[in-house]
Amino acid sequence: PGSKAGTAEEKNAAFMAYKQSVAPAAASKLAADMGELRDKRAELKDKCAAVNALKADIDSLQKQVEAMALPGLSAAPKSPDDVVDSDTYKAMAALKAAKTSYRKAYDDVKDLRTAMEPVTAAVQDGRQALVEEFQAWYAGGGGGGGMGGGGMEDVDPSGAGMDYGEQFESMELQRILESDPESSAFFAAKKTLRNAGPAKKPVGRGRY
């Protein structure tokens, strides 16, 4: 246990040194891209919540309008221009406004998701490059590594050629990098599931 802890600490120290002295620009850009992605994800969460709230308002107002159908009408009025009483007119006007707001909010979500694509790609590419370049540097003796074939394992984001435990370790490593690229747990991911077996969000129903 002691030697394993020591190895993890040595690798973490080497990684910190690598980011500070060998690849500060790449590490800084990755951190900035990840910060931007976190901000956009938070914004997307808020926008999706707004869309869903508007969808709930529309459903409620639609039921209200349908319930206000005047006696003798075969169906609920379709627009405020139909012959309706004052309360029905107000409910229909509110429904129309809610649908307009929904369409705008829905378009905002789509635009934000499109804007997130290059940022997500930048994070994925930057993270993979930083890991691979550090591994090569460390295996070649950087930071006192010189571990050769018995050193760090390559991270294969695709999971190709990995068993279940290796895929878990790769996903865990990427999760740690994404959540906190400075974390001392970077190299402490364990193969705890190597022998284990395999074990949002709708945004309304579309445009109105």
Image (cartoon, grey):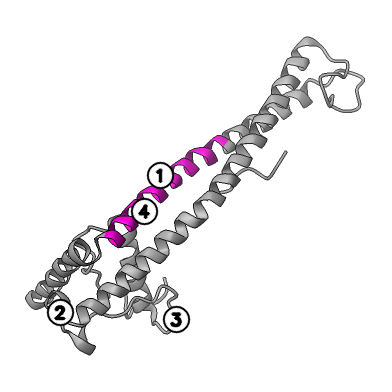
Going by the image, does 205 lie left or right of 67?
left
Q: Is residue 122 above or below residue 48?
A: below
Q: Secondary structure at mark 2?
A: loop
In reply to whether residue 160 is colored magenta, the answer given is: no
Q: Which mark is residue 145?
A: 2
Residue flagged by tag 2: what amino acid is it? Answer: Gly
Mark 4 vs mark 1: which is more N-terminal? Answer: 4
Mark 4 vs mark 2: which is more N-terminal? Answer: 4
Query: Viewer-proximal residue, 67 or 201?
Result: 201
From the image, give the main secondary structure of the stretch colored magenta.
helix
- Range of magenta residues: 25-50
> Marks 3/4: CA distance?
25 Å
Q: Which mark is residue 160?
A: 3
Asked if the residue at tag 2 contacts the one at tag 1, i.e. Cβ–Cβ closer than 8 Å, the answer is no
Give the percent coordinates (x, y) of residue 65.
76, 24
Q: Looking at the image, is mark 3 or mark 4 nearer the viewer?
A: 4
Q: Which mark is residue 34?
A: 4
Query: Viewer-proximal residue, 71 or 4?
Result: 4
Q: To which residue does mark 1 refer?
A: 39
Residue flagged by tag 1: what amino acid is it? Answer: Asp
Q: Secondary structure at mark 4?
A: helix
Mark 3 vs mark 1: which is more N-terminal? Answer: 1
At x 10%, y 76%, the residue is: 1
